Amino acid sequence: MSTEQASRRHVSLGGYAVTDAGCELVTYGLGSCLGVALFDSNAGVAGLAHVKRPSDPRGQTSDDAVFADTGIRALYSEMQSQGAARQHTVATLVGGIDTGNSASLICTGIGKRNIEQADATLAALDITVTERDVGGDTVRTVFFDGETGAVTIEQGGGDRYVIQDG
């Protein structure tokens, strides 16, 4: 395994990862899903979740990031166990497009609901959202530098831009 591969961790759909070793966290294909990047620069702890839905309709809790409400809490809890503190943690949100259409009502508005639930959960945790690249109609990939907190977005066509400087 090359050094580059060893210093990059992939975050899969409904999952999350935390690093205090400064590796890059990456999640691909954010359509209606939402990427939630949390960073505590004082503790040097970073976390990234790939949220699929706003909340579990059955009201269950889980330790993964399938649902924004419980997933963000699980991500932040793990970050706290590695030294993160609320007063130093900030959030960046990416994704949340509306992939539905009139023929597919089940998906209509899911991106917007993911964003709303993430905002509500982060507010309840007293974590400030400092940057967001949400909505629209473009699928995004997130590259999150766990050392600096920089968030780089790559769109489907390969265009890259930074929304959160480290």
Image (cartoon, helix red, strand yellow):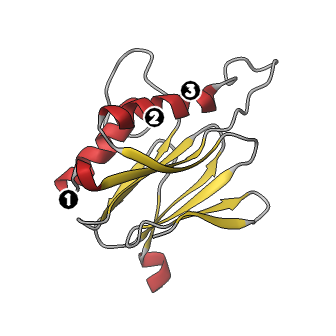
Residue matched to label 3 = 113
Q: CA gap, disc 1 to disc 2? A: 23 Å
Q: Give residue 154's position: percent from left, percent from top.
A: 67, 62
What residue is at 30 percent from the left and 41 percent from the top? 74
Check the image and report above or below for 102 versus 73.
above
- Identify the element where label 3 is drawn: helix
Tag shown at residue 119: 2
Position of 156 relative to 86 (above/below): below
Examine the image and state in which quarter residue 20 appears.
bottom left
Give the mark nearest the N terminus, 3 or 2: 3
Q: CA distance from mark 3 to mark 2?
A: 10 Å
Q: Does residue 50 appear to the left or right of 110 in the view shown?
A: left
Amino acid carrying label 1: it is: Gln
C-alpha span from label 3 to label 1: 30 Å
Q: Earlier in the sequence, mark 3 or mark 1?
A: 1
- In the rendered image, is residue 65 in sight? yes
Identify which amino acid the numbered label 2 is placed on: Asp
Cβ–Cβ below 8 Å for labels 3 and 2? no
Work out whether residue 53 can be spotted.
no
Q: Residue at x 23, y 56 (%)?
A: 84
Q: Residues within 10 Å of mark 3 (few under 14, many from 20)?
A: some
- Dot 3 amino acid type: Arg
